[in-house]
Image (cartoon, rainbow, N blue to C red):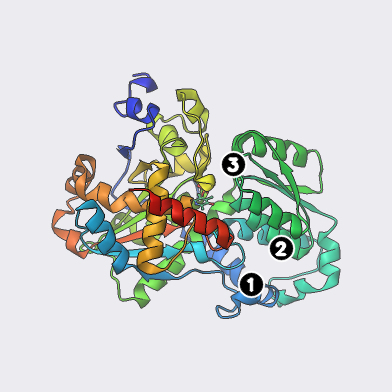
């Protein structure tokens, strides 16, 4: 069968909303994938703990968490009622929001992977130079001698915006020279903010893939330059995966069980795949078959859906099937998925759904009205998850095939809100009013 014959392909090509169930999903435990295990996640968490004294000393907003970059997990009962009223579809179980929109330092899920990779690189350099040991108090990294040391090195990245913010802010704080290659989708305020922090911003008129390609090429010509490779980086992936350990603790603290009788559903906005992929990998390590992860993508940029559905991964782009990759969800405006992540997801991702841009704004304003929480459009992509599961034929098929029917009253749904707190007020207000105007 040619990939063009896939039953969902016509709808995907026409930019219609779909829910794709992953036929390769294995509901059994999958503990070791691509040589990565829970040990790698713990190692990443340990590294973040070593850096906590430095983070705390450098970014006052992390004082309360003692330098640990973490976001709240909130029950959003009023939003749930509003969603049920608007869609006429009851959501069984409770609804929670993972507020990565409010992660300290850079206000998006990229504050996990992006910052982690910069810290790891800084640590590698300082260790190999003998300036640091694992036992050091890492707050010494604030000292001028370290800034001067790091200023000999460059860090580069290609980004639609938020990864650039995370890499840019962290690298600049440590003293690195930073180059952020921004795609055309990147919002002006993100570029302005980075330039104010002394980051070199290079702008492209084409999309994310081109910004990454150019950034990678320029960086590779300079032996002192390190390229953060969003499409292929294991370090980024592991940085994201630490979220799972933290989430498990938060659920425990809230008294929410996840086991055979209490399924957990998680809905994650997906761009190139590293963020949602890392979180999914971590959650599967912890909860095995009792967690069900779904990605959400814009109807005009369903790159991971296309890559996984066809099995072609990074060998296919949304442009190849005639889609334009133009979406208001700038954080998700990616035409070609990470092949590395897609392959890891083959056995552990339950499915992927797509969502129209208008609905992102609608959910954004609903969340503001009901819970007084403000997130960016990309971050609202997961909100269609519960409705897909509860009321579509595909959702019902999933629930039946997993034998979940009798357990849905005990379910917990987590919508992963991936960004928003850095958006300037006037721009956020325009998003909000746009959402209010959509019926
Ligand atoms: C980057 C981003 C995502 C998705 O992460 P990927 O690693 O690109 O899949 C989701 N939401 C927001 C707001 C983002 O910036």
Reading the image, the residue beneath label 1 is 50
Q: Position of residue 192 (x, y in %)?
A: 70, 54
Q: Position of residue 85 (x, y in %)?
A: 22, 58
- Mark 2 closeness class: few <14, some 14–19, many ≥20 residues within 10 Å: many
Precedes in sequence: disc 1 or disc 3: 1
Label 1 to label 2: alpha-carbon separation: 10 Å
Looking at the figure, which quarter contains the N terminus? Answer: top left
Q: Nearer the viewer, mark 2 or mark 3?
A: 3
Reading the image, the residue beneath label 3 is 185
Q: Is residue 344 visible?
A: yes
Reading the image, the residue beneath label 2 is 123
* 379 or 289: nearer the viewer: 379
**Is the residue 426 above or below the residue 64 in the image?**
above
Q: Is residue 281 visible?
A: no
Q: Position of residue 93 (x, y in %)?
A: 23, 63
Farthest residue, direction top? 2
**Is the residue 286 above or below the residue 321 in the image?**
below
On the picture, is 88 further left or further right than 4? left
* 29 or 405: nearer the viewer: 405
SS class, disc 2: helix
């Amino acid at each position: 069968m040619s990939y063009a014959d896939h039953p969902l392909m016509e709808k995907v090509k026409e930019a219609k909303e779909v829910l794709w169930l992953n036929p390769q999903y294995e509901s059994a435990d999958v503990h070791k994938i691509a040589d990565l295990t829970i040990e790698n996640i713990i190692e990443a968490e340990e590294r973040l703990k070593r850096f906590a004294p430095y983070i705390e000393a450098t970014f006052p907003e992390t004082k309360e968490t003692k330098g640990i970059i973490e976001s709240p997990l909130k029950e959003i009962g009023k939003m749930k009622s509003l969603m049920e009223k608007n869609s006429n579809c009851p959501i069984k179980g409770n609804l929670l929001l993972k507020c990565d929109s409010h992660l300290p330092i850079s206000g998006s899920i990229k504050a996990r992977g992006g910052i982690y990779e910069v810290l790891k690189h800084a640590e590698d350099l300082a260790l190999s130079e003998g300036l640091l040991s694992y036992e050091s108090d890492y707050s010494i990294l604030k000292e001028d001698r370290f800034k001067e040391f790091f200023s000999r090195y460059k860090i580069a990245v290609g980004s639609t915006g938020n990864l650039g913010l995370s890499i840019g802010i962290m690298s600049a704080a440590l003293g690195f020279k930073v180059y952020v290659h921004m795609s055309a989708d990147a919002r002006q305020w993100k570029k302005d903010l980075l330039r104010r922090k002394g980051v070199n911003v290079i702008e492209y008129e084409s999309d994310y893939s081109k910004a990454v390609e150019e950034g990678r090429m320029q960086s590779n010509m300079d032996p002192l330059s390190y390229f953060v490779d969003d499409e292929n980086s294991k370090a980024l992936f592991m940085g994201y995966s630490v979220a799972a350990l933290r989430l498990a603790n938060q659920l425990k603290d809230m008294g929410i069980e996840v086991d055979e009788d209490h399924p957990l559903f998680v809905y994650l906005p997906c761009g190139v795949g590293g963020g949602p992929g890392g979180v999914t990998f971590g959650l599967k390590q912890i909860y095995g078959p009792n967690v069900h992860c779904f990605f959400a993508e814009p109807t005009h940029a369903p790159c991971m859906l296309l890559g996984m559905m066809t099995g072609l991964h990074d060998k296919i782009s949304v442009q190849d099937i005639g889609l334009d990759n133009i979406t208001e969800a700038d954080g998700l405006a990616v035409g070609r998925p990470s092949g590395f992540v897609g392959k890891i997801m083959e056995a552990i991702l339950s499915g992927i759904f797509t969502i129209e841009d208008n609905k992102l704004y609608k959910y954004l304003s609903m969340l503001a009205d009901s819970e007084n929480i403000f997130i960016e459009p990309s971050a609202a992509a997961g909100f269609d998850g519960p409705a897909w599961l509860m009321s579509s034929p595909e959702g019902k098929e999933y629930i039946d095939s997993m034998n979940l029917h009798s357990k849905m009253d005990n379910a917990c749904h987590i919508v992963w809100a991936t960004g928003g707190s850095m958006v300037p007020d006037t721009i956020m207000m325009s998003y909000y009013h746009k959402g209010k105007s959509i019926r």
